[in-house]
Amino acid sequence: DAGITQSPRHKVTETGTPVTLRCHQTENHRYMYWYRQDPGHGLRLIHYSYGVKDTDKGEVSDGYSVSRSKTEDFLLTLESATSSQTSVYFCAISESQGDYEQYFGPGTRLTVT
Amino acid sequence: SQKIEQNSEALNIQEGKTATLTCNYTNYSPAYLQWYRQDPGRGPVFLLLIRENEKEKRKERLKVTFDTTLKQSLFHITASQPADSATYLCALESGGYQKVTFGTGTKLQVIP
């Protein structure tokens, strides 16, 4: 995994509680992304960032917010978790050159009970 | 809206044969298309990119074709090995900031 970590790796939480997932990179890449992966849906983009304090919504952003105060950190917050947000969450990073490959973190398995 | 289709059923092939995976898309004209490999419990790993003006790209035992008229990409693994068993995802460029939209993936099983 190219210098990208996610924390926590596993979390169980109750409906209605706030949850924050952290993505940390040591590659100094400009672009960062949050995806969720669910059976039958594949990877879907939640939010992305194209620089410090520059973020935008993806395909499935309802119920999620993000922040990027430093190049290396991208936080995903579920303000009030729901059971439909039970999923595996992946962070990815990319740079604006070469083959534009996205490097993925190891994922966070979130269960909302 | 943009739609990407990959074979949802698993593909089983014999070791040594060529595996061919398909990625079809509609309602879009991506500037490039990528293929990723994903192993269980891991994040996807980038394999290849092919641009809209390229017909074919090769990397070791991998070959990707891109037909913008048919709106289809084919991903070939020649001389397949059990270690190639994984889920393979195609991803289409989707509008700036290196954003891509992923297909649901095809699970490949190479049988010894």
Image (cartoon, coloured by chain):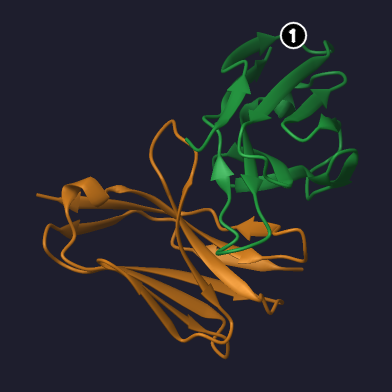
Nearer to me, A50 or B36: A50
User: For residue A99, which quarter of the picture?
Assistant: bottom right
Q: Is residue B43 above or below residue B103?
A: above
At a point 61% along the width and 32% down the height, the residue shown is: A26
Question: Residue B19: where, in percent of width, then height?
Answer: 26, 66
Q: Which residue is mark 1?
A: A14
Residue A54, placed above or below residue A9:
below
Residue drawn at point x = 68 percent, y = 59 percent: A96
Q: How many marks?
A: 1
x and y percentages locating residue A18 in the rendered image: 83, 14
Q: Nearer the viewer, residue A8 or A40?
A: A8
**Looking at the colours in the rendered structure, which chain would you say is drawn in orange?**
B
Q: Residue furthest bottom?
A: B69
Dot 1 falls on which chain? Answer: A
Question: Within 10 angstroms of label 1, few (less than 14), some, or many (20 or more) residues?
Answer: some
Please tell me which residue lies in front, B68 or B32.
B32
Residue B76: x and y in percent read: 31, 70
Q: Amino acid at mark 1?
A: Glu
Q: Colour of chain A?
A: green
Within the image, what quadrant is residue A3 found in?
top right
